[in-house]
Amino acid sequence: MEKRIGIQITLIKQYLSRIWEKMLLEYGIDAFNGAQGRILYVLWNHDAISIQELADQTGLTNATLTSMLDRMEQKHLLERRPAQDDRRKYLIALTGKARAMEKEYRAISNRMSDLTYKGFSPAEITQLETYLERVLENVRELEKHQKTTKR
């Protein structure tokens, strides 16, 4: 049996990204793109968190995240605040402008989920998401292992 998870996930991500970008435009949202939306989504659920926490929850590297945060800060979607417990550390927090877009973003997200899970029963959705969480945990562990071993 040929195992094709890598290509399947890649194709799903590419299609979803293109559909997502079109939906953002349909809703008149041009203040951020799909990748930046992932950052906002995390912050809508856990505002004022460290860059490392944000990297862990979005899957973006610190280098990629830093440049994206710079652009989002220039668009007044977020701000960096000094952490009260550690002056060397900054927390990433939403602005009022970003908070105002949450309702539309969640509407698009719900619409996307409905389209993505079309034809699935609730039990199938639960099962699929359980399997995907296991795959995600496997790849996270693999990445951690790669970082700790030398080539």
Image (cartoon, rainbow, N blue to C red):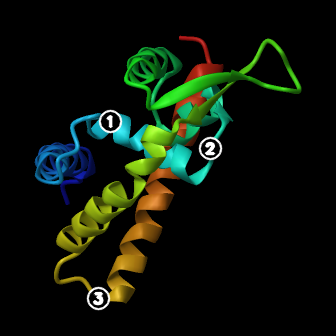
The kind of residue on which mark 2 rests is Asp
**CA separation, marks 1 and 3?**
29 Å
Residue at mark 1 = 35
Say above or below: 92 vs 64: below
Look at discs 3 and 2 and give the one toward the viewer.
2
Residue under label 3: 121
Judge left or right: residue 47 versus residue 2: right
Relative to 88, does residue 102 appear above or below in the rendering? below
Occupied quadrant, residue 119: bottom left
User: Measured from the top left, where is residue 149 in percent x and y?
Assistant: 62, 19
- Mark 3 vs mark 2: which is more N-terminal? 2
The residue lying at 83 percent from left, 15 percent from top is 87
Residue in view at x 33 percent, y 55 percent: 105
Residue for badge 2: 47
Counting residues from the N terminus, which is met first, the one under dot 1 or under dot 2? 1
Between the residue at mark 1 and the residue at mark 2, the CA separation in whole angstroms equals: 17 Å
Q: Is residue 87 above or below residue 119?
A: above
Q: Secondary structure at mark 3?
A: loop
State the residue in front, 12 or 102.
102
10 Å crowding of disc 2: few (<14), some (14-19), many (20+): some
Seen from the viewer's position, the closer of residues 143 and 98 is 98
